[in-house]
Amino acid sequence: MLFRKEIEDLIESGDLRGLLAKSAEFHGHICPYSVYGVKAGYIAVRELGIKNVGLEEMIAIVETNNCFSDGIQIVTGCTFGNNGLIYRDFGKTAVTVAKRDGTAIRIALKPEFDDAVANKYPEASALFEKIVVRREEVTEDEQTRMMQLYTEMGFELLEVSEDEMFIIERKTINVPAYAPVFSSRICAFCNERVMATRMKERDGKPACIPCANAEYYEMNGAGIKHVEGSKK
């Protein structure tokens, strides 16, 4: 059964508006960077000519954790959960989508286009700066107005040509191996099941990372960060 049939039908028919609506269901709203993700994902799957059922038949390597990445996940079907999404903390609005044979396409947002969009929609840019960047107190009308402008912008941006918006490079890459399946163990302290490769030790007993107060890595809005364990 193809659970992504509706999305695949939208891709096949070139219905970018429908794909953007699907992205908004996942992302929560429409904004320029989610549009870029939808368009980039559409270009990639169209060029590669492959359908994704979530078994790592294709991978998407994203270079940012902004709104762009959600558009990529919806259209390509590559997610963290199905091991089709790889995150490289480069801070670039770019993605490389590849088939298992290494056939790939890298799509990156043109800086000059990004700047032009900000200049073309000054009211939306000013509201974004106030609401999202500076986190100032705003009225409900201002919040609604930004969402309205972003939705209008989003559908307008869908009409922009690919070459005006993106740098597109067709290439061949070394595709990472399929994700391994690891065994699990039980933490002796919280009694929760833990992937064996993440198991630590505390007082000579198997312990999960939190119970062992061990260091770990966390991906949040700032990117991938190292977190020190608690000192005992």
Image (cartoon, rainbow, N blue to C red):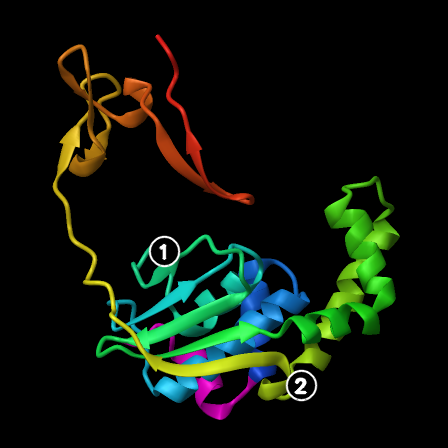
Disc 2 secondary structure class: loop
The x, y position of residue 38, in whole percent, is 54, 74
Above or below residue 129? Residue 228 is above
Residue 129 position (above or below residue 149): above
How many numbered tags mark residues here?
2
Q: Residue at x 81, y 63 (%)?
A: 124
Residue 160 shows which numbered tag? 2
Q: Looking at this rendering, what residue extends furthest in the bottom direction?
A: 13
Residue at the image position 35 percent from the left and 85 percent from the top: 48
Task: Classify residue 174 as left or right of residue 130.
Answer: left
Q: Which mark is residue 173?
A: none
- Local crowd size for mark 2, using a 10 Å CA cut-off: few (<14), some (14–19), many (≥20): few
Along the line of sight, the residue nearer the viewer: 98 or 137: 98
Q: Quadrant of residue 118?
A: bottom right
> Which image quadrant: the C terminus?
top left
Q: Which residue is mark 1?
A: 80
- The residue tagged with tag 1: helix, strand or loop? loop
Answer whether residue 8 is magenta in the image.
yes
Q: Position of residue 16 (x, y in %)?
A: 57, 83
Indicate the amino acid at tag 1. Answer: Phe
Residue type indicated by callout 2: Val
Our reading of the magenta stretch's main secondary structure is helix
Image spot of residue 206 (x, y percent): 16, 21
- Is any part of residue 7 visible from this angle? yes
Left/right placement of residue 152 relative to residue 13 reads: right
Residue at 78% x, 48% y: name it.
Answer: 131
In magenta stretch: residue 118? no
Q: Residue 169 or 51: which is nearer the viewer? A: 169
The CA distance from mark 1 to mark 2 is: 29 Å
Q: Which residues are magenta?
A: 1-15
